[in-house]
Amino acid sequence: MSVFTLLEQVTEKKIELPKNTLKNTLIVSHSILHAGTVNLNKVKNSVPHVRGAGLASAHADYKLLTRYFDQGKVVSDQGHQQYEQLMQGLRTLCWMVLFQQRKRFGVNKLKHLLLDGTKWDFGQESIHLMTLCVLVGDVAIPIWWEDLGKAGHSSQEERIAMLSEAMKKYGLAGMTLLADREYVGREWFKYLSESGLYFVIRVKEGIYHDEINANGGRTWQQLKAKAAQKAKGKKVSKKIKIDGLDLHYIVMKNPRPDAEDELVYLLTNLHSPTQASRLYQWRWQIEVCFKHLKSNGVNLEAMNVRGKEKRHLMMAIAVLVYILAIREGLIKEYRDGIRWVLDKASGFEYRAVSAFLKGLDILRRRALNLAQFKRYLSKITKGQYRLIFQNV
């Protein structure tokens, strides 16, 4: 997918939202950036720093924040339409700030999608943000999310519904989806293939044995025994059919020496099992993204709003802050290079400092108040960010 596909979110329709929507969006997102959390009780104390005045009471600043997220309290068709327009505007702003000057960090083609969920409890409720990311270089960027409101795994129906909504907005066909063991199922595999998506999905050891053994050649036990003799990261594979789909079943020696599971089992509809086994290692980047959102940057688990739409809106603001930090970090790496550190235990190389943390430090120093934040956004988008909400 070309990065232009994401930028096509800019709409030609008139966006009819309450006056000051853009200003309040910037106040809320900048206050969350300043506070380092999405907990509105704490964010309210950053509002005076952002607005440059301390005349309002803490209660008034808190009400400003809650009124913004009350736009997710959908009680009418008009309210739903306004909420959808706000979310569309926020997504557009995200892609604009990331890709407007993409040549500075060398991103032109987007090929890989990552799917996973992050879960935690909020009082008696369960929050489960199933999240679809696009891989930009080696960094995961969320492009769609759905709060399933439960602690358990997602169903095939829930996954299909979410991805169908994402595909209405973005040209994802032809990309390759990477996902972990939760994201399996016959209807799911069929949907992905019929939607024009390639996939590499890890599966549990104990499933699809009948399909493997029914197709001639090595049995499942023989594949497992052969893979166990391989070096780290090496694999064996076999063509199989699942409900008429031509797939490769891959058994790979886990490349991580500290991993609990010696072998990794994958299913893919890619033509090359070698390519599939290499690509799967990128799946980990969505875990890194969740870590930054939950621990290092905006403390997502401190979210204290109720209702799915409000949480989706909160996630959109968190993603905007995350993307702004990633943008600054990638540009710094493009300019200065990356210092890698070798983990002797695993044999993998890691950034000494993540692109996100590098960028977060830069971002917080470049935008100390709302006026500076506006100038910063105007500079990186060439003034176009204002056009997103030009009719409000």
Image: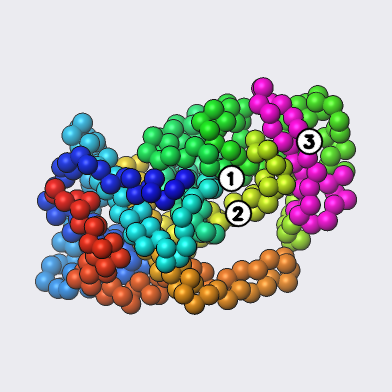
Q: Identify residue for label 1.
A: 178
The secondary structure type at the circle numbered 1 is strand
Crowding at mark 3 (Cα within 10 Å: few <14, some 14-19, many 20+): some
The x and y percentages for residue 235 are: 78, 47
Residue at the image position 40 percent from the left and 61 percent from the top: 102
- Residue 249 counted in the magenta span: yes
The magenta span reads: 226-254
Residue at the image position 84 percent from the left and 26 percent from the top: 216
The secondary structure type at the circle numbered 2 is helix
The x and y percentages for residue 287 are: 55, 55
Residue at the image position 79 percent from the left and 57 percent from the top: 232
The x and y percentages for residue 9 are: 32, 45
Left or right of 158, for residue 391? left
Task: Please tell me whether residue 340 is drawn above or below residue 256 in the rendered image.
Answer: below
Labelled pair 3, 1 in contact (Cβ < 8 Å): no
C-alpha separation, residue under disc 3 versus residue under disc 1: 19 Å
Left or right of 389, for residue 315? right
Q: Identify residue for label 3.
A: 238
Task: Please tell me whether residue 156 is drawn above or below residue 51 in the rendered image.
Answer: above
- Residue 105 counted in the magenta span: no
Labels in figure, total: 3
Q: Earlier in the sequence, mark 2 or mark 1?
A: 1
**Residue 282 disc label:** 2
Q: Amino acid at mark 3?
A: Lys
Residue at the image position 79 percent from the left and 52 percent from the top: 234
Q: Earlier in the sequence, mark 3 or mark 2?
A: 3
Task: Please tell me whether residue 373 is drawn above or below residue 22 in the rendered image.
Answer: below
